[in-house]
Amino acid sequence: MPELSFYILQSESLHDRYFFACRLIEKAYQNGQFCYVLMDSLAEAQTLDDMLWTFRVGSFIPHQILTQAPPDIVSQVLIGVENAPPAWRSIVFNLSKQLPINWESSTRILEILDNSESTKIAGRARYSAYKQAGATITTHKI
């Protein structure tokens, strides 16, 4: 069973949510962990992709949007709307409204929620699904 963490921001801003995700993704990358970021749409994936290049001066996080086959190089962050490829399932950042497919095969899942009603409703549904499966969840109010 993966380690599950819910990060709940006080802000309702999507920008703040993505900015916080960038900080956590950077931390994972600096620790040598290559992850998958699950988004709801390619437009959202592109927004996060752009933000990862600019969110902090001096930051460098090799990443790309998964559009077809996964890249040969595993040493980068993948952003996508589909199921995480096997080499990237260890750590999944969930910024989507959906429950990640094969989430049980991950080592860690980080759910990042803002304080908007639609995000909270989808987050509660995922929280319940994880709990029903017997997962232990840590919640952080940011």
Image (cartoon, rainbow, N blue to C red):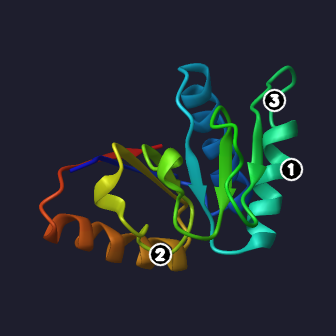
* Residue 50 located left or right of residue 136: right
Closer to the camera in the image, 124 or 39: 39
* Label 3 neighbour load within 10 Å: few <14, some 14-19, many 20+: few
Nearer the camera: disc 1 or disc 3:
1
Residue 101 falls in image quadrant: bottom left
User: Which residue sits at x=55%, y=22%?
Assistant: 32
Q: Position of residue 132 (x, y in %)?
A: 15, 71
Query: How many angstroms separate mark 3 from mark 2 (CA)?
Result: 28 Å
* Residue 98 located left or right of residue 140: right
Query: How many angstroms separate mark 1 from mark 2 (CA)?
Result: 22 Å
* Residue 58 located left or right of residue 121: right
In terms of sequence position, does the residue under pointer 1 or pointer 2 come before the other? Answer: 1
As drawn, the label of residue 98 is: 2
* Residue 13 position (above or below residue 41): above
Q: Three-letter amino acid code at disc 3?
A: Arg
Q: Position of residue 2 (x, y in %)?
A: 27, 48
Q: Secondary structure at mark 3?
A: loop
In terms of sequence position, does the residue under pointer 1 or pointer 3 come before the other? Answer: 1
User: Which residue sits at x=52%, y=29%?
Assistant: 33
Q: Secondary structure at mark 1?
A: helix
Q: Three-letter amino acid code at disc 2?
A: Gln
Mark 3 = which residue?
56
